[in-house]
């Protein structure tokens, strides 16, 4: 597929800081948006329907799957998550860079369709720090945190399937690194040729 915007996949074990980093990136860079997934998980305190996720029942989720409305979907920690096909396609066609915050299973499905999607994997500086962040976030029950710690190694084992790896130790440094990936990719010749076609015509005819 040849879209105007660049598609990014950002993955990480739960608690590594993916959502915080992406939020800070969006605040500091124009022309990039994050796709809002559908999920069957319950909203956390402070999560808003349509902003953080489209929160749906399992029945609704299954019918969306049946209608082919998802670009990818996967079961993560016993809940279903999926990315809306039409929304992503429309934003890319409008020239916007789109970020999918999805797990490694979804990343594989997306790469098979958007072969030029770029993958960024975010890792914590240690498993002990990952546990501290999951606990410190204060939004998941103790058994949910244990389940996410168990799953963290499985998610981490897929790090080599991604194009870029950002270690989220110092937050500001990790944000700089993530931002650099996006800024550098916008200077690629084929992107610049599209964005500045009139300039190149004026410069070299
Ligand atoms: P958090 O990442 O710890 O904030 O936890 P979430 O409950 O928001 O997400 C749980 C898992 O679902 C993560 O591993 C995400 O990568 C994954 N996930 C979220 N949205 C999607 C999606 O649209 N598709 C897929 N395949 N996975 C998703
Ligand atoms: P994810 O979306 O990957 O599950 P979050 O963005 O929710 O992760 O981050 C998990 C917790 O860790 C949050 O409470 C967040 O404020 C905190 N956090 C994120 N990055 C850092 C960092 N570099 N240093 C310390 N705490 C962090
Ligand atoms: P949380 O429930 O903590 O918000 O997210 C847990 C995990 O689900 C995260 O690792 C997140 O990346 C993943 N996730 C969220 N939305 C999607 C999605 O639409 N598709 C896939 N495959 N994973 C998702």
Image (tube, grey):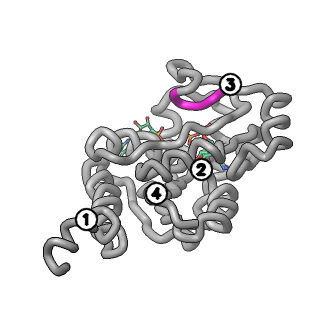
Q: Is residue 168 magenta?
A: no
Which of 180 and 12 lies nearest the eye of the viewer?
A: 180
Magenta residues? 51-55
Residue assigned mark 3: 42
**Disc 1, SS:** loop
Vertically, is 21 above or below 180? above
Which of 39 and 123 lies nearest the eye of the viewer?
A: 39
Residue 102 is marked as 2
Find residue 158 and report its horizontal and vertical position in percent: 61, 67
Q: Nearer the viewer, mark 2 or mark 3?
A: 2
Residue assigned mark 4: 122
**Gap in angstroms between the C-alphas marked 2 and 3:** 17 Å
Of mark 2 and mark 4, the one earlier in the sequence is 2
Q: Nearer the viewer, mark 1 or mark 2?
A: 1
Residue contact between numbered discs 4 and 1, judged by CB atoms under 8 Å:
no
Q: CB at mark 4 closer than 8 A to ligand 2?
A: yes
Q: CB at mark 2 closer than 8 A to ligand 3?
A: yes
Residue assigned mark 1: 196
**Gap in angstroms between the C-alphas marked 4 and 3:** 25 Å
Q: Is residue 198 left or right of residue 58?
A: left
**Disc 4, SS:** strand
Q: Is residue 81 left or right of residue 178?
A: right
| Residue plotted at (70% across, 30% down) | 41
Residue 178 is marked as none
Of mark 1 and mark 2, the one earlier in the sequence is 2
**Gap in angstroms between the C-alphas marked 3 and 1:** 45 Å
Which of 197 and 103 lies nearest the eye of the viewer?
A: 197
Q: Residues within 10 Å of mark 4 (few under 14, many from 20)?
A: many
């Amino acid at each position: 597929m040849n879209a105007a915007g660049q598609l990014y996949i950002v993955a990480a074990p739960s608690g590594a800081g993916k959502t915080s980093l992406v939020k800070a990136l969006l605040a500091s860079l124009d022309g990039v948006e994050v796709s809002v997934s559908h999920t069957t998980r319950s909203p956390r305190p402070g999560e808003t329907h349509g902003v953080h996720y489209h929160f749906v029942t399992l029945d609704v989720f299954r019918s969306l799957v049946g209608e082919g409305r998802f670009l990818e979907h996967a079961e993560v920690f016993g809940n279903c998550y999926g990315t809306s096909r039409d929304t992503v396609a429309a934003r890319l066609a409008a020239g916007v860079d789109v970020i999918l915050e999805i797990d490694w299973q979804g990343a594989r499905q997306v790469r098979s369709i958007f072969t030029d999607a770029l993958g960024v994997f975010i890792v914590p500086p240690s498993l002990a720090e990952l546990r501290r962040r999951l606990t410190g976030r204060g939004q998941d029950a103790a058994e949910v945190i244990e389940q996410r710690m168990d799953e963290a190694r499985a998610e981490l084992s897929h790090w080599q399937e991604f194009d870029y790896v950002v270690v989220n130790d110092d937050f500001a440094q990790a944000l700089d690194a993530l931002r650099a990936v996006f800024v550098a990719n916008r200077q690629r010749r084929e992107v610049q040729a599209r964005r500045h076609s009139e300039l190149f015509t004026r410069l070299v005819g």
